[in-house]
Image (cartoon, rainbow, N blue to C red):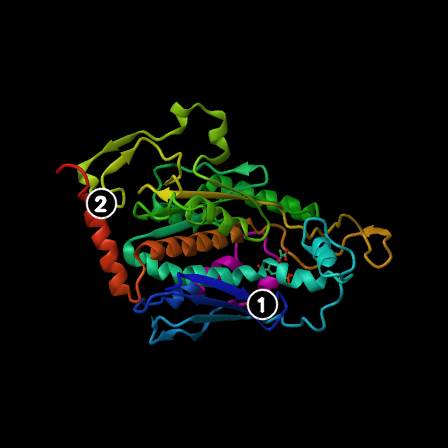
Amino acid sequence: MAGLDYRTAGESHGQKLVALIEGMPAGVGIDIELVDGELRRRQGGYGRGGRMAIEKDTVTVVSGLRRGVTMGSPIALEIANKDWRIDDAPPVHRPRPGHADLAGSLKWLTTDCRETLERASARETAARVAAGALARCLIREFGIETVGFVKRIGEVEARIDAEWRVEELVRRRNANEAYCPDEWSAAAMIGAIKQAKRDKDTLGGIVEVHVHGAPPGLGSCMRRQDKLDGRLMQAVGSIQAIKAVEIGLGFGAAALPGSEVHDEIGYDAALRDTASLGFTRTRNNAGGIEGGMTNGQPIVVRAAMKPISTLLRGMDSVNLITKQPERSDYERSDVCSVPAASVVAENVVAFEIARVFLDKFGGDTLTEVRAAYENFMEAARGIGGPT
Ligand code: EPS
């Protein structure tokens, strides 16, 4: 049986965005409110541009559900574009540095960058969010919760307390338009975005995703394709404008000795019934993944987003028809979409967790998945002597 996966189709100013999800077991109740809520959040966040005032993203389920519950058949989702005008949209001959414009025009042998930018646009992330939010309906059944938030915008870095759990992070994040759990930094981030707008410039940043409640043993050290850290890096690294992905301490681990990096192991029988199975760690520098597998600690993924490449002030470029120097084209755009990227990353990570979860516990029905999960957890709690 093929595993869980999804594909997307659609252009920024095409008729619709589409996500096709295959491999979801039967019997999973889908919370469309959750999916629409995540689409709404993706459209928001401080720094978004004019397009978001036009669109009201909501999902239409075309197939795969009966009375709100999966049947095991492929699930097709659609999100309509109100700003559907791809045939009339003007050509773009002056590529924006940083966008797909030049590389795509060379690849597809055209002087009109629109041929590429329509698909390369981050509008496609609406379909990814819909697929990821839908997959969350599966992993929630097993107590797995995800939260994504903004860690940095430009020069402003948030202070995140390691003690904050999912509910606390979500509550704090939802209290401001920067989607940042640290309210003081959130205000400074919004100030930085306002300044960038005045400067006709754009800002990037860092987003962070935590996954709580994932059982140990997701992913594998046996095949490179199954290593969960590598899979998360691919999934998150493929999000538009992401230039780096870290797990746990990430790049920070390079500068420290092993004694300060690795998370010492203990055991507390009182935690036996949690995802950790009772094993405790002094910290979580590993970000919940060792040897390409979950270790029962929260998974922590961080990603760096470059600033949006459409600048109101333009940048030096070349007209692809004349080959003469000109400023790059300006298309209506965002000043900063790091808050939106935190929503995308959260849901993309959730989808990948659902995939590895089904790789280990997969079955045709949720009943079988649950039985496999409970069997494993019981067996894993039972290794070693009695506690
Ligand atoms: C986006 C829709 C796009 C842009 C943005 C993301 O709409 P439009 O191009 O019509 O303004 O706002 O796309 C980019 C940042 C990009 O580089 O392509 C969306 O729905 O997220």
Q: Secondary structure at mark 1?
A: loop
Q: Which residues are magenta?
A: 36-57
Q: Quadrant of ligand 1?
A: bottom right
Name the residue carrying label 1.
10
Q: Spatial distance from mark 1 to mark 2, Cα to Cα?
A: 44 Å
Residue 181 drawn at (x, y percent): 43, 44
Disc 1 crowd, CA 10 A, few/some/many (<14, 14-19, 20+) = many
Pick the residue in front: 321 or 109.
109
Residue 140: % across, % down: 32, 57
Amino acid type of disc 2?
Answer: Ala
Identify the residue at horizontal 64%, vertical 44% (top origin): 195
Q: Is residue 304 above or below residue 110?
A: above
In depth, the one of 384 and 381 nearer the eye is 384
- Position of residue 48 measured from the top left corner of the image (x, y, whole percent): 59, 55
Marks counted in the figure total: 2
The residue wearing badge 2 is 380
User: Which quarter of the rendering shows the C terminus?
Assistant: top left
Q: Is residue 354 above or below residue 269?
A: below
Label pair 1/2, CB-CB below 8 angstroms: no
Can residue 177 be seen in this snapshot? no
